[in-house]
Amino acid sequence: MQRAIEEAYAHGIFGKQGLLKGKSDFKVECHLHRGAGAYICGEETGLLEAVEGKRGWPRIKPPFPAVKGLFGRPTIVNNVETLAAVVPIIEHGVEWWKGHGCESATSGSPSYGTKLMGVSGHVERPGVYECDLGIPLRELVETHCGGMRQGKKFKGAIAGGVSMGVLGPDQFDAPMDFDIGRFDVLGLGTACPTIFDEDTDMVAVARNISRFFKNESCGQCTPCREGSGWILKLLMRIERGAGTTKDLDLLLEVAGSMGLTPGTTICGLADGNNWAVRTIVNKYRGEFEARVKPQFIPVTITAGG
Ligand SMILES: Cc1cc2nc3c(=O)[nH]c(=O)nc-3n(C[C@H](O)[C@H](O)[C@H](O)COP(=O)(O)O)c2cc1C
Ligand code: SF4
């Protein structure tokens, strides 16, 4: 990245002389700011705080960064992939871009263009594949990734980053587009799915994801800070066979009460925890039920009147 920035300076794209060595009045400087690796510093306002040299705590919005961002100035925050897509759109035109991807299946936003899909997990050839948006997950796995590893059966997939939740065993044909929410996941996210085969223990998957969110919660909001710890404890109890059916309901209740969607937190990290846990428990409930003991409610019966 640093080398690419230096090349761009050398070619006069960045720098004091103006864009393209004085051919334009627009001047732009480019700095690479290295973070320390916290997941929360990917959230746009957590990122701004970190760049300002503070702890990466997401800010309450509004004001949004476009109004008041880095050092109080209007700021846009975009993913590098988004910015990289601008160049081919300008070069080849909007119609060309719209020729890739697909229309909306739900009269929502269309999914035009291509996307870098980083596939990991139980496939023969994990890797990053640039595909048209809307490619069915099955086609991505079978055509580009060489199929399921050792010919095993598909059991499920993280849709695109753990925050998005999990596609179930009957959702292998889900198109990788912006309408993927209709398969009861939060969204397309990074469009980088993790694939699980038939041997995967989904209780362990839920516990592993929950440990991640507990560790990465910045701690500002009580439902996220405390809820992520409760969820992890409940899942660890269920995994070692000491949980009850009541724990399963409690798990869904705690998860469902944290995040921007229920309106209890500052940022979407808690929604990620919420969706990951709820989609795994709901789509693989049988696996969880097989690990818990039924909850007996003591009943006192008194003789006589
Ligand atoms: C907990 C959390 C972590 C995030 N991490 C990233 C990240 O690593 N990279 C990223 O581009 N966006 C991340 N986002 C989304 C950003 O807040 C923001 O929406 C995005 O960078 C906007 O860029 P785009 O419109 O180009 O996608 C994260 C959001 C949350 C809630
Ligand atoms: S939701 Fe969690 S990660 Fe986001 S600001 Fe609140 S405590 Fe921090």
Image: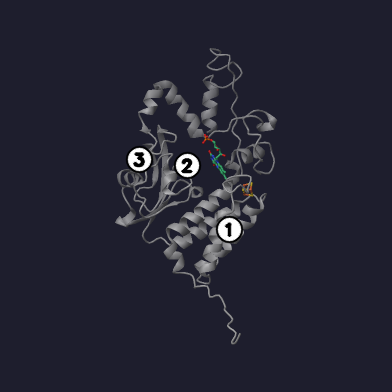
Q: Is residue 37 visible?
A: no
Q: Mark 1 is on which residue type?
A: Val
Q: Which residue is mark 2?
A: 190
* Lateral position of residue 182 relative to residue 249, left or right: left
Q: Is mark 2 within 8 Å of ligand 1?
A: yes
Do residues under tags 1 and 2 come within 8 Å of each other at their CB atoms?
Answer: no
Q: Which circle marks residue 231 in the picture? A: none
Residue 244 image offset from top left, x and y in percent: 52, 70
Q: CA distance from mark 2 to mark 3?
A: 14 Å
Asked whether, in this view, residue 104 is left or right of residue 229, the answer is left
**Marked residue nearer the N-terminal end (2 or 3):** 3
Tell me how far mark 3 sits from mark 1, CA to CA.
Answer: 34 Å
Query: Residue 285 location, x and y as percent?
Result: 44, 62
Give the number of callouts.
Answer: 3
Q: What residue do we see at 55% from left, 75% from top? A: 297
Secondary structure of residue under mark 2: loop
Q: Amino acid at mark 2?
A: Thr
Q: Closer to the camera: disc 3 or disc 1? A: 1
Q: CA distance from mark 1 to mark 2?
A: 26 Å
SS class of the residue under badge 3? loop
Q: Which residue is mark 3?
A: 135
Examine the rendering and report whether any part of residue 169 can be seen. yes
